[in-house]
Amino acid sequence: MCLGIPGRVIRRLDGYAGQLALVDVAGEERKVNVGMLDDPDLAPGDWIVIHMGFAMERVDEAGARRAMAGLELMGRPRDEPGAAP
């Protein structure tokens, strides 16, 4: 299993053999290679999980929220009040 960050497809980009999409990743627009997805119907508004600039899988909005929550959890400092030792 790899770590990935969720992003929402804004639009497919012309050229590049149809393998690039403009994706909203945490409020920033990024070009992401979607060529590894076996999903020709990827459309604006769809959620994907991205690793190293490549879309690894398509997820629903709930899956995207879970992925982001997991990333946020890993980034929390250990000395937060109520954090497990």
Image (cartoon, rainbow, N blue to C red):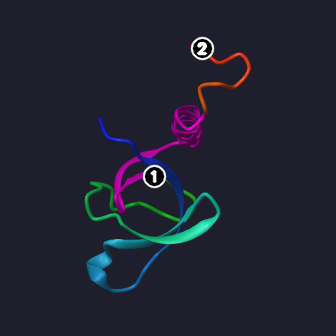
- Residue 53: image x %, image y %? 36, 63
Q: Residue at x 30, y 55 (%)?
A: 37
What element does badge 2 sit on? Answer: loop
**51 in magenta:** yes
How far apart marks 1 and 2 lie (CA) works out to 31 Å
What kind of residue is marked 2? Ala
Q: Residue at x 32, y 40 (%)?
A: 2
Toward which corner of the image does residue 77 lie, by quadrant?
top right
> Which residue is situated farthest in the bottom direction here?
15
Question: Magenta residues, as a range?
Answer: 49-76
Q: Residue at x 65, y 18 (%)?
A: 83
Residue position for label 2: 84
> Which residue is situated farthest in the front direction here?
79
Contact (Cβ within 8 Å) of mark 1 with mark 2: no
- Residue 65: image x %, image y %? 59, 39
In the displayed structure image, the side of residue 11 where residue 1 appears, left or right: left
Q: Which mark is residue 48?
A: 1
